Image (tube, grey):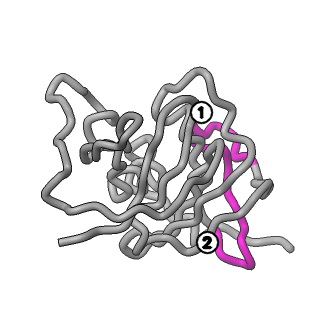
């Protein structure tokens, strides 16, 4: 069975998310910082009245050679919307799902949750992210139940 993934870069890493979850890609969107939020949460993004956490993927994955300033990947993951802040956008690529190589077992914490596996490319790997785990961690980074949909919007 073929699956399609949107490829993008954070630092020197090639990453991918399921194309069926993609809403849109935007450039240079600003977000509102939230006091006390963890480093991985850049803030809250208001996209045409739709509020969502903006996740700095370099901070989330602890990639030091990245600023994640340019692009926002807007995803609908289960019932939640989320914005992934990344360095650059690639193509939508199709792979046979059986070719997914599982991640190493020595990963721990959110890294283990965040990575589903990888597909081999001619020049390296495309690391596939588990968007459900990222969304869950972004919606609830401290284990506190909160809904961004309940926050007031001022336009």
Task: Tell me if 71 is positioned left or right of 39 in this view.
Answer: right
Residue drawn where x is 76% and y is 53% of the image = 32
Q: Nearer the viewer, residue 116 or 153?
A: 116
Q: Nearer the viewer, residue 55 or 27?
A: 27
Q: Is residue 34 magenta?
A: yes
**Disc on res. 24:** 2
Instruction: Tell me: residue 14, above or below residue 5.
Output: above
- Image coords of residue 53 (percent x, y): 59, 56
Q: Nearer the viewer, residue 119 or 117?
A: 119
- Image coords of residue 138 (percent x, y): 48, 50
- Image coords of residue 1 (percent x, y): 17, 72
Q: CA distance from mark 1 to mark 2?
A: 24 Å
- Tell me the magenta residue range: 33-51
Residue drawn where x is 64% and y is 69% of the image = 51
**Disc on res. 39:** 1
Residues packed near mark 2 inside 10 Å, few (<14), some (14 to 19) or many (20 plus) = few
Residue drawn where x is 18% and y is 43% of the image = 101
Residue placed farthest to the front in the image? Answer: 122
Q: Quadrant of the C terminus?
A: bottom right
Q: Is residue 23 magenta?
A: no
Secondary element type, mark 1: loop
Task: Tell me if 90 is positioned left or right of 79 in this view.
Answer: right
Residue placed farthest to the right in the image? Answer: 155
């Amino acid at each position: 069975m073929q699956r399609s993934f949107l490829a993008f870069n954070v630092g020197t890493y090639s990453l991918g998310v399921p194309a069926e979850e993609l809403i849109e890609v935007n450039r240079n969107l600003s977000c509102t910082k939230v006091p006390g939020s963890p480093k991985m949460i850049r803030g809250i993004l208001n996209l045409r009245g739709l509020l969502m956490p903006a996740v700095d993927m370099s901070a989330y994955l602890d990639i030091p050679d990245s600023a994640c300033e340019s692009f926002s990947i807007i995803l609908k993951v289960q019932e939640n919307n989320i914005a992934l802040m990344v360095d650059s956008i690639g193509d939508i690529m199709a792979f046979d799902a059986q070719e997914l190589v599982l991640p190493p077992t020595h990963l721990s914490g959110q890294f283990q949750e965040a990575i589903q596996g990888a597909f081999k490319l001619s020049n390296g790997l495309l690391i596939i992210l588990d968007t459900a785990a990222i969304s869950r961690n972004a919606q609830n980074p401290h284990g506190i139940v909160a809904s961004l949909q309940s926050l007031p919007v001022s336009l």
